[in-house]
């Protein structure tokens, strides 16, 4: 039977890497819900929309068809047919996305789209509110954690590898700031679901994390 797997946790805890690997191993569909909030943020910034204006954001969202497509080189993200895979990872988008994701109407519409994508099971969905709100009946729920130092270090090393300018201290601040906004918002804040299994990845490799979750899935 194809089940649903929810992976939640703070920023840069390795959720997408782990979720992608699990989806591959199980031949499931990987759904990156953060990419959907990022795509909306990108489109809003492009149109000069204020990220604190819910009404304007909703206009953009209703006009924007967001697609997540698997490809051999990784997941591709499209907004109204435009490939925004790279564009949604810029600092500008990263530093604004949590303001966009605070608005209740934005979340309501995103959750609706995410549930549609997950309705047939056979999905690994990662985000902040998957186990608590989007897929409360998911058979497997994982909450991934790591210290903020470790998360900033991993992001920094990733940036250096990709040749992207990177400042460790600044990354640490940005990650902590995003976690704070995500956990303090009124609607669907970042929380571990009561029935989620918490895994602290601070001193674990990706393989170890994936192996642990595969064991849980196969139980
Ligand atoms: O996962 P990622 O870091 O790409 O997510 C970007 C942002 O989108 C998060 O910091 C959060 O503000 C928002 N988000 C959310 N709920 C989700 C996924 C992401 O609020 N399910």
Image: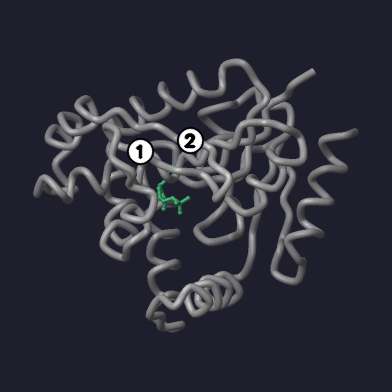
Question: Which mark, residue 69?
Answer: 2
- Looking at the picture, does residue 113 appear above or below residue 81? above
User: Is residue 105 rendered to the left or right of residue 188?
Assistant: left
Q: Residue at x 36, y 42 (%)?
A: 37
Q: Residue at x 18, y 44 (%)?
A: 44
Secondary structure of residue under mark 2: strand
User: Is residue 110 rendered to the left or right of residue 27?
Assistant: left
- Looking at the picture, does residue 95 appear above or below residue 158? above
Question: Which mark, residue 96?
Answer: none
Residue 74 x/y as whole percent: 55, 48
- Report which quarter residue 82 is drawn in: top left
The quadrant of the rendering that contains the C terminus is top right
User: Is residue 211 rendered to the left or right of residue 18?
Assistant: right
User: Which residue was labeled with disc 1?
Assistant: 78
Q: Residue furthest left?
A: 48
Q: Residue at x 37, y 58 (%)?
A: 89
Residue 185 x/y as whole percent: 36, 46
- Looking at the picture, does residue 90 appear above or below residue 159? above
How does the figure colour the protein chain or chains?
Answer: one colour
- Report which quarter residue 79 is drawn in: top left
**Mark 2 CB near ligand 1 (8 Å cut):** no
Local crowd at mark 1 within 10 Å, few (<14), some, or many (≥20)? some
- Report which quarter residue 192 is drawn in: top right
Tag 1–tag 2 contact (CB < 8 Å): yes
Q: Residue at x 45, y 43 (%)?
A: 76
């Amino acid at each position: 039977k194809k089940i649903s797997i929810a992976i939640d946790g703070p920023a840069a805890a390795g959720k997408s890497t782990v979720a992608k690997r699990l989806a591959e191993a199980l031949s499931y569909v990987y759904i990156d819900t953060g990419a959907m909030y990022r795509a909306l943020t990108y489109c809003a910034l492009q149109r000069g929309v204020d990220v604190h204006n819910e009404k304007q954001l909703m206009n953009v969202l209703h006009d924007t068809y967001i697609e997540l497509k698997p490809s051999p080189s990784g997941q591709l993200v499209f907004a109204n047919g435009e490939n925004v895979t790279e564009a949604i990872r810029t600092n500008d988008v990263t530093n604004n996305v949590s303001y966009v994701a605070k608005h209740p109407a934005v979340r309501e519409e995103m959750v609706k789209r995410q549930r549609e994508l997950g309705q047939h099971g056979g999905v690994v969905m990662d985000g902040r509110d998957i186990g608590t709100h989007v897929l409360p009946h998911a058979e497997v729920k994982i909450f991934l954690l790591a210290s903020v130092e470790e998360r900033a270090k991993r992001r920094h090393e990733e940036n250096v590898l990709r040749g992207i300018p990177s400042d460790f201290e600044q990354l640490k601040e940005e990650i902590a700031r995003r976690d704070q906004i995500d956990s303090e918002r009124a609607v669907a804040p970042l929380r571990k679901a009561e029935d989620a299994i918490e895994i602290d990845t601070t001193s674990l490799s990706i393989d170890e994390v994936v192996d642990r979750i595969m064991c849980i899935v196969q139980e």
